[in-house]
Amino acid sequence: MRLVNAGEADLAIPSATDAYFAYKGEEVYHGRPNKNLRAVASLFPLFLSVMVKDASGIKQVTDLKGRTVSLGYTNHAQARRYFRGILASWGMAESGLKGNTVPHVIAGVRDLMQGKTDATMFAVGVPKNAEIQAKIGTIRFLNVNNTPEGVARLRKFVPTADVLQMKPKKGRIGIVEPTYLLAERYLVVTNAKASDKMIYELAKLFYEKQKEFVGIVPIFRLYKPKQLSRDQGLPFHPGAEKFYREVGAWQKKS
C-alpha cells in the first residue's frame, strides 16, 4: 500500500482493516499516514475463528481457559489483531491464556497438528483445512460473539470487520453447526491521482463481470456487486464513485 500511496503502483488488494490503518497512520502504520489511498471496490470476505479438534470438548472460546493456545502471532500483524479481536468479543485477552507464542498462523496450525496446542486461529474455507482434518480428525471452528457488545469489542481491534453466520455444508470443513465467524473484507485501493477513466472502468468490471472473475479465482463469488461501494473507512476514488452512482449502487455516505 505504501507503493500505491506513493504512486509507484496502481492497485493493491489489502484487507479492509489494514487499508484503514494505513490511511489513518495507526497501529503498524503509526505516524505514517497514507493519505493518498482511495477505495475502488469492497470485495469478498475472509472468514476466521479459533480452530480446535472437535474431540477436545472445547465448544466455546471461553473454554480455552486452562488450555494451551497459539498466541502472539509476532510476525503477522493481521493475524494478531484478528485473534485479539475474537478473544475481545468474549471479554477475554491473551494475558488470561496459557500457550505457545508463534510467529504466524501456519506455525500455529503446525503446533495444533503436532499436538503441542489445543487451539489456534485460522481461516475457514482454505485447502489447508482438509490436510489438518486428515491429520487430527474432525475440526471445529468456535463461535465469535455476535452480540452488539461483542461486535463492538471486536471492532476495537478490527474496525471494519463483521460477525456473520456460516451454516454447515458439504466441503465446509470445521463448520459442524451454524457458527458465527469474523468476516474481514478485502478492498481494492488505488492512488488519489489515478485516472478517473481507468478507475471508472475498473469499478465497472467488478460490477458487470463477476462471473469472469469467479472463473479465475472462485472466492470472487462471495462479493455482491451492489455492495462494492461499502464504506470501509477510506474515501472512494471519484472515478469509482461516479460509476456506482450511475448504476444506483452507491452506499458510502457523502
Image: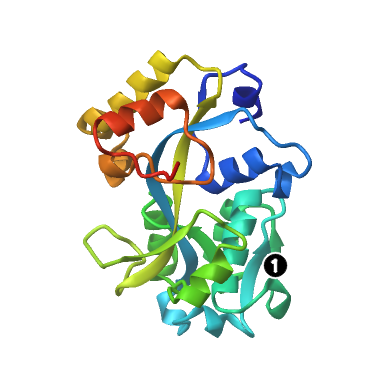
The reply, left or right, for residue 166 in relation to residue 148 is: left
Specify whether residue 32 is in view. Answer: yes
Q: Tell me the quadrant of the picture where the N terminus can be found.
A: top right
Q: Tell me the quadrant of the picture where the C terminus can be found.
A: top left
Q: Dividing the picture into quarters, in which one does residue 101 lie?
A: bottom right
Q: Nearer the viewer, residue 200 or 8?
A: 200
Residue under the image location 48 percent in, 64 percent down: 49
Spot occupied by residue 201 in the image (x, y as percentages of width and height): 33, 19
Spot occupied by residue 107 in the image (x, y as percentages of width and height): 61, 55
Display colour scheme: rainbow
User: As shown in the figure, which amino acid type bears the numbered disc 1?
Assistant: Asn
Specify whether residue 209 is in view. Answer: no
Q: Dividing the picture into quarters, in which one does residue 132 lie?
A: bottom left
* Residue farthest toward the right in the current orientation of the protein: 31
Residue under the image location 41 percent in, 23 percent down: 239
- Identify the residue position indicated by label 1 in the image: 100
Q: Nearer the viewer, residue 121 or 110?
A: 121
Q: Dividing the picture into quarters, in which one does residue 22 lie?
A: top right
Residue under the image location 36 percent in, 44 percent down: 251
